[in-house]
Image (spheres, rainbow, N blue to C red):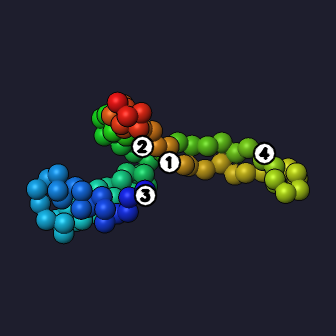
């Protein structure tokens, strides 16, 4: 099962004891904060849950999988997301 944005808002509303509209507004605010942090190159840490950081990837040589031809991949910034201990334990069923 894949949780959609509305599913997460509904579960958050139930956990926090607020209405779904309030939970959706808070979720939208969290999403905006994450996007702003990534755009500014800042790291985000939700202790035990997840961490997000923007890292620089150097230019490198890749291969076209269809033709095997070498091609240059430009340097750039990417977002790296890591699960925290709480999420890892939950995934393991602990």
Q: Given this view, does label 3 or label 4 mark the residue nearer the observer?
A: 3
Label 3: few (<14), some (14–19) or many (≥20) C-alpha neighbours in 10 Å = few
Which residue position holds label 3? 2
Label 1 residue SS: strand
Q: Give the x, y percent position of residue 84.
A: 38, 35
N-term mark: 1 or 3: 3
First in residue order: circle 2 vs circle 1: 2
Query: Which residue has dot 1 on it?
Result: 79
Q: CA distance from mark 2 to mark 1?
A: 7 Å
> Which mark is nearer the camera, 1 or 3?
3
Distance Cα–Cα, label 1 vs label 3 = 22 Å
Q: The C terminus is located in which quarter?
A: top left
Judging by the rendered image, the residue that carries numbered circle 4 is 61
- Quadrant where the image shows the N terminus: bottom left
Which circle's residue, 4 or 2, is located before the other in the chain? Answer: 2
Q: Which mark is residue 52?
A: 2
């Amino acid at each position: 099962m894949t949780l959609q944005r509305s599913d997460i808002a509904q579960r958050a509303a139930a956990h926090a004891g607020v209405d779904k509209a309030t939970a959706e507004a808070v979720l939208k605010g969290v999403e905006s904060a994450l996007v702003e942090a990534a755009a500014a190159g800042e790291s985000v840490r939700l202790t035990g849950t997840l961490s997000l950081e923007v890292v620089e990837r150097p230019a490198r040589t890749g291969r076209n999988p269809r033709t095997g031809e070498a091609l240059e991949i430009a340097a750039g910034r990417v977002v790296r997301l890591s699960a925290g201990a709480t999420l890892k334990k939950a995934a393991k069923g602990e």
